[in-house]
Amino acid sequence: MKEIHSRKGLQLFLGFVFGIIFGFLLQKGGVTKYDVIVGQLLLTDFTVVKVMLSAVITGMIGIYAMSSWGWVRLHPKPGSWGMSALGGIIFGVGFATLGYCPGTIAGAVGNGYLDAALGGVAGIIAGAGIFAALYPKLRIGILARGDFGDITLPELTRMPRRVAVPLAAVLLILMLLALEKSGL
């Protein structure tokens, strides 16, 4: 499997295949439906959180295993509080305005929802263009505020990955079970 690192075409193909699988699972989980997403925003339907927690748990364990086996190398990107705040604002405005996030827009377009195809795709393109145009000023301004580097959860907690990953997975599973038991 180590040959994946040097084969960009294979990496793109695998990303495409897993993207289709993820989109299919989003659709089957019901999170491409406007009513489900609005229910999440109104805190009356936690389907989106449950699906995303399941994805985080699966991805975290999968990436940890593949990293341990030498199949993948982790390259965390550096971050800052400014990046997180601005990204959260942009994401939140788009999410609240249209009722979709980028992943669910793709799934909704696949379902044939016109609002996602027109509003969502147009919003993504316009938002990316505006961000790209403003990036040189943002890079030295708000995006540079509160730099926390490329730290990962195990590094932040000073735990070995073999402890931090299972512990985080158990905590997330307990959260998922509590949400399921609550009936939300």
Image (cartoon, rainbow, N blue to C red):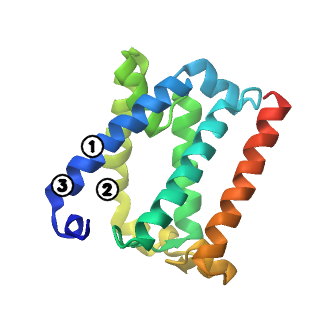
Q: Report which quarter residue 153 is drawn in.
A: bottom right
**Which residue occupies 72% across, 27% down?**
45
Q: Are the residues flagged by discs 3 and 1 in contact, CB closer than 8 Å?
A: no
| Residue carrying label 3 | 10
Would residue 146 be seen by someone viewing this image from the given angle?
no
| Residue carrying label 1 | 16
Q: Nearer the viewer, residue 148 or 90?
A: 148
Query: Label 2 is placed on what type of residue?
Result: Ala
Query: Label 3 is placed on what type of residue?
Result: Leu
Q: Position of residue 160 (x, y in %)?
A: 61, 81
Q: Marks 3 and 2, how far apart in space?
A: 28 Å
Q: Position of residue 169 (x, y in %)?
A: 66, 58
Q: Nearer the viewer, residue 109 or 25?
A: 25
Mark 2: secondary structure: helix
Q: Residue furthest right?
A: 182
Q: Report which quarter residue 11 is drawn in.
A: bottom left
Mark 1: secondary structure: helix
Q: Is residue 70 left or right of residue 100?
A: left
| Residue carrying label 2 | 132
Q: Is residue 152 left or right of residue 41?
A: left
Answer above or below: position of 21 versus 15. Answer: above
Q: Is residue 111 left or right of residue 79?
A: left
